[in-house]
Image (cartoon, rainbow, N blue to C red):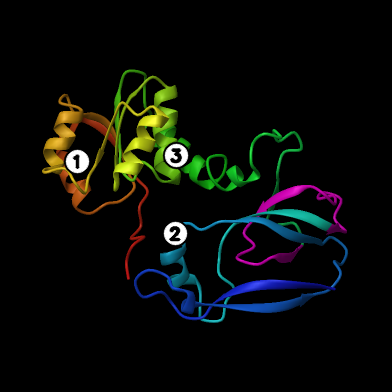
Amino acid sequence: MVQAKTWILKQHFEGFPKDCDFELKLEQLSEPRDGEVLLEAVFLSVDPYMRPFSRVRMQAGDVMIGTQVAKVIQSNNPSFPVGCHVVGRCGWRTHTMSDGSDLIKVLDDWPQDVSLSHALGAIGMPGLTALYGLEEVCAIKPGETLLVNAAAGAVGSVVGQIAKLKGCKVVGSAGSDEKVAYLKELGFDQAFNYKTVPSLEEALKNASPEGYDCYFENVGGHFSSVAIPQMKAFGAYCCVWRHFAIQ
């Protein structure tokens, strides 16, 4: 028997999530049956999508949704031997019983000097979102100019780095001077704090007077209204936001 800790959604968020919105409960898990594996969490994800999804797909009392990297500690499933690591939508819990149908096995030759947390970030869902948006939606080409907002976030930071690797000029915006400094460390050609510039329109024009070939939108709202008119003719627009900050 294993005692699992689970984080329960006690009530839906009003504004930013607070401690009182969650409740920690204990759950007893039995031994795995044929085809099942017992997982122990290594990393849990905290992502923007959880806010809207929790309102649509969750009720008070449910285990908080989320993806995790976990280690197989007991197994009756030959596809997932003891000791291997997996990625699964197990929610916020320390231990999970799974039949393996919702698990993705981490590569056996995962580099030792790369944290497994990246399977939830640059090599996981956020990274795949960035890659798909750039290659399948924007279809960026060397020499083009890319604009990305929320550029210091999990998706935006990968968007900028992939675009640079593909030979693009990259302009990013973020909400603090520290984040702007981080973007410059990543190799962004231009970066600015949208909260402190006198004019967002002028900041975008100064960063790329010739306009933008691709706009990777992570925020929406006012920023999008100002940025879209500065797109070049036949420019590409990739939008991945979904009211993440609604009440």
Whether the magenta-drawn stretch holds residue 85 is answered as yes
**Displayed quadrant of residue 74:** bottom right
Mark 3 vs mark 2, CA separation in Å? 15 Å
Q: Quadrant of the C terminus?
A: bottom left
Q: Residue 221's spot in the image, x, y percent?
A: 22, 54
Mark 1 vs mark 3, CA separation in Å? 19 Å
Q: Which mark is residue 227?
A: 1
Which span is picked out in magenta? 74-98
**Displayed quadrant of residue 189:** top left
Q: Residue 209's spot in the image, x, y percent?
A: 15, 26
Tell which circle, 1 or 2, labels the residue nearer the N-terminal end.
2
Bin the neighbour count of mark 1 within 10 Å (Cα to Cα): few under 14, some 14-19, many 20 and up.
many
Q: Residue 192's spot in the image, x, y percent?
A: 25, 38
The type of residue carrying mark 2 is: Tyr
Q: Which mark is residue 130?
A: 3
Give the labeled residue for mark 2. 49
Q: Which mark is residue 219?
A: none
Q: Main secondary structure of the magenta part?
A: loop
Secondary element under disc 2, as helix, strand or loop, is loop
The type of residue carrying mark 1 is: Ala
